[in-house]
Amino acid sequence: MRRMKKQKEILIIIPAYNEEKTIVPLLEQLEQPEIAQMADVLIMNDASLDATNYIAKKRHHEVVTHVFNLGYGSGLQLGYKYAVRKGYQYVIQMDADGQHDVCNIPKIYEALKTKDSDGNYPDIVLGSRFLEGSSSFPVSAAKKIAFTWFRTIIRLGTGAHITDPTTGLQGLNWRTFLFYSMYNHYDDKYPDANMIMQMLLLGFRVEEIPAVMHARTSGVSMHSGLKPILYMFRMTFSIIAVWIRERILKLDVESVNELDKYEN
């Protein structure tokens, strides 16, 4: 008699664009038993022009490929839809460039399943580069300015102190990625500090834990050159728009309330 394969609770979503030089070491680490036994891997290939798609499929991972380059956020949101359809309980998203160490995955999973002093589980767990216990991580002057600016805006807008508002290493519970999967205004390019601001304003519980990260060793970052400056202006306007949308207009409160009807 054939034994049914046990459904894993965690889906690891990895957005990738032209990451053939960095994705192999990452997948090798994710294929180690301590990770493979607890999580499945989904590669969101954003119309890469190199061998990213071929490499991931050759290693027998699930791959969803965009025909056109639609952006980092579009890949994530499609990954959330996949996670909902397949019945996963948690999503952990990480970058394909090797900056996010695989050792963070069990720690994020543990944090998602740990209640706070009030008996509540976190909805979102952020892997931070800047908490005590985090690994040393090189940051350029331009990025330091951006991080400080985004921390300040989020604190002024929500009262929350988030040390790493642009981290791509995040763990989400089922309620959170269900909301993201259905949200028509999810940022298709850079869902970073703006989405954290939004989720805090909507009452989602956000927690940070120290993370181990490494500098990119090859490939081109989506925040290289003058892009951090352009990103900073774009993100600032997006954060302000989110604050107006949620604090003043309260446009998404009903959408959050509707999540209750999907609860098991």
Image: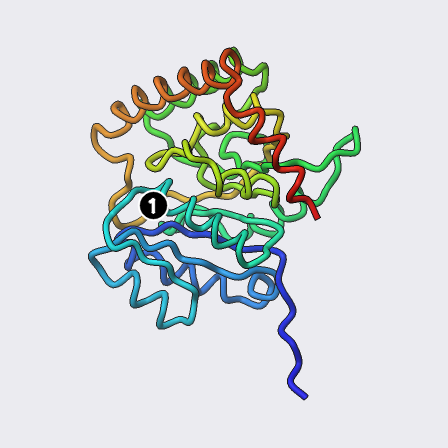
Residue 211 picture quarter: top right
User: Label 1: few (<14), some or many (≥20) within 10 Å?
Assistant: few
Looking at the rendered structure, the kind of residue marked 1 is Arg
Locate residue 109, reporting x and y percent: 63, 48
What's the residue at 54%, 28% (across, down)? 199
Locate residue 219, reporting x and y percent: 26, 49
Residue 21 picture quarter: bottom left
What's the residue at 55%, 43% (across, down)? 178
SS class of the residue under badge 1?
A: loop
Q: Is residue 216 left or right of residue 257?
A: left
The figure's colour scheme reads rainbow
Residue nearer the viewer, 17 or 241: 241
Q: Is residue 96 left or right of residue 245?
A: left
Locate residue 29, reporting x and y percent: 48, 61
Does 76 appear above or below 164? below
Residue nearer the viewer, 61 or 88: 88
Does 33 appear above or below 50? below
The quadrant in which the N terminus is found is bottom right
Does 92 appear above or below 158? below
Q: Is residue 250 left or right of residue 191?
A: right
What's the residue at 45%, 47% (across, down)? 94
Q: Which residue is mark 1?
A: 216
Q: Residue furthest bottom?
A: 1
Residue 45 picture quarter: bottom left
What's the residue at 53%, 56% (across, down)? 85
Q: How many marks?
A: 1
Does 60 appear above or below 111? below
Locate residue 203, reporting x and y percent: 62, 25
